[in-house]
Each structure stands twice: as structure tokens, then as C-alpha cells.
Image (spheres, rainbow, N blue to C red):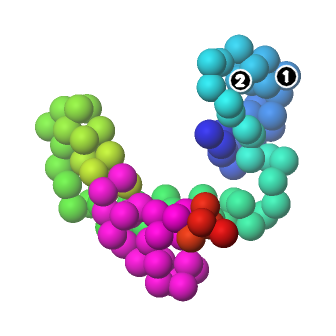
Amino acid sequence: MILHSDRGSQYTSESVETLIDQQDVSILQSHGFSCYDNAVTESFFHTLKTECVPVDHYDTREDGHCSLFDYIEVFYNRQRRHSSLGYRTPCEMEELFNNT
């Protein structure tokens, strides 16, 4: 998992690093990555906001969670073709990568 934020230096503080280290999952902070990482993240959230969120109305938090899960796991990763991946899905690219 990558923790990404462009909100300021508080997200690179020692207290945040300590909190991350205490979690039971592997978390990397994106401030150590290149600007390209930020561009990919920003592009994903732009796509999410334009393709999914304005279309759906969420009566409950669970409705929002289910909608976002369906968009990301069912559509975005498995059906949506990405020009940056040679018009393949992320799942297709992962399969190609794992088979090489």
C-alpha cells in the first residue's frame, strides 16, 4: 500500500512514520518516489471523480464503499482499457508481467 498525499510536510513527519511502522500492513510513503508517481495518482483520482463519483448518489457510507469497490475492482482493473498500458487492463498487464 502506498500512502500518498500532497497536503504538506505533516505527512512526512516522524509521528506519521511511527504510526505507519506500527501497522500490520506494509505501507510506503509516496514522498520518496518520483514526480511520475504523483502524476499516476493524480490521474487515477481524476478518472475516479469524473467516471464514477458524479454518476452515483450514496445514501449511506456502505453504498459509497460498494460503488467505489465495484468501480475499482470490477471495472477499472478488469475491464477499462488504459492507453498508458497499450490499451490493456491493469489485470492483463499484471498477468503479462507475472508470466515473463
What type is the residue that disc 1 sits on? Answer: Glu
Q: At 65% across and 18% down in the image, what residue appears?
A: 23
Residue under the image location 74 percent in, 34 percent down = 11
User: Tag 2: residue type?
Assistant: Ile
Look at the picture and state if 97 lies above or below 73.
below
- At x 14%, y 37%, the residue is 59
Q: Which residues are magenta?
A: 73-95
The label nearer to you, 1 versus 2, is: 2
Q: Is residue 14 above or below residue 99?
A: above
Q: Is residue 43 visible?
A: no
Q: Viewer-proximal residue, 91 or 5?
A: 91
Judging from the image, what secondary structure is the residue with disc 1 in? helix
How many neighbours does mark 1 have within 10 angstroms: few (below 14), some (14-19), or many (20 or more)?
few
Residue 68 lies, in percent from the top left, at: 32, 48
Q: Report the number of numbered marks.
A: 2
- Which of these two is toward me, 85 or 48? 85
Of residues 10 and 91, which is closer to you in this image? 91
- The x and y percentages for residue 84 are 57, 80
Residue 14's tag is 1
93 sits to left or right of 50? right
Q: Is residue 11 visible?
A: yes
Q: Quadrant of the N terminus?
A: top right
Give the residue pinned by disc 2: 20
Q: Is residue 75 magenta?
A: yes
Question: Which residue corresponds to the image point at 66% horizontal and 69% vertical from the top-left?
Answer: 100
Q: Would residue 11 be counted in the magenta stretch? A: no
Marks 1/2 in contact by CB < 8 Å: the verdict is no
Q: Earlier in the sequence, mark 1 or mark 2?
A: 1
Mark 2 Cα within 10 Å, few/some/many (few <14, many 20+)? some
